[in-house]
Image (cartoon, rainbow, N blue to C red):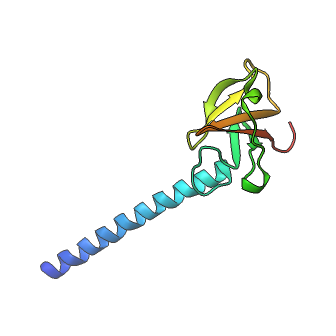
């Protein structure tokens, strides 16, 4: 079997394979974001932040802990969230029980999730 009909079939298969690969890539992105933040889309201040191999809960609209600039006393910028927010934590090698995340003028306290 050759000719224009065969070429169209191969072109259709190639386009289908490319579409499947793109869909798998997009799905993988969303699953990775959800695994890291408990959100389906990257946000500057996500529901969950991973810092220093530990999970911190920043909460969401009904249960968030917004704080003022005083909360940054003694903290330094130590990293970024998956959505670009700045993570403030104590200097040195101390394991913090809480961190503060800043984005777009908003400061939010994030407590350690489930133990030490």
Among the 4 quarters of the image, the one containing residue 52: top right
Task: Say if 91 sits above or below 104 in the image.
Answer: above
Position of 70 with respect to 19 (left or right) is: right
- When the figure is inspected, residue 28 is found, relative to residue 2, above or below; the finding is above
Pick the residue in front: 98 or 115.
98
Residue 111, percent from left and from top:
80, 40
Name the one closer to the observer, 105 or 112. 105
Image quadrant where residue 51 sits: top right
Q: Residue at x 59, y 51 (%)?
A: 33
As drawn, the residue found furthest toward the right would be 115
The image shows residue 55, relative to residue 47, as above or below, that is: above
On screen, residue 77 versus residue 1, left or right, reads: right
Quadrant of the frame with the N terminus: bottom left
Along the line of sight, the residue nearer the viewer: 35 or 74: 74
When asked about the image quadrant of residue 65, the answer is top right
The picture places residue 76, in percent across and down from the top left corner, at 68, 22
Residue at (79, 22) in percent of width and height: 94
- The x and y percentages for residue 64 are 76, 48
Q: Position of residue 36 (x, y in %)?
A: 65, 48
């Amino acid at each position: 079997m050759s000719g224009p009909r065969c070429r169209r079939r191969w072109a259709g298969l190639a386009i289908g394979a490319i579409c499947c690969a793109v869909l798998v890539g997009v799905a993988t992105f969303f699953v990775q974001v959800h695994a890291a933040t408990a959100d389906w889309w990257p946000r500057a201040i996500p529901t969950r932040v991973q810092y220093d191999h530990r999970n911190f809960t920043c909460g969401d609209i009904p249960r968030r802990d917004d704080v003022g600039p005083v909360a940054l006393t003694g903290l330094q910028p130590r990293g970024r969230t998956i959505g670009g927010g700045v993570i403030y934590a104590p200097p040195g090698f101390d394991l913090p029980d809480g961190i503060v995340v800043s984005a777009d003028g908003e400061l939010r306290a994030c407590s350690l999730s489930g133990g030490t």
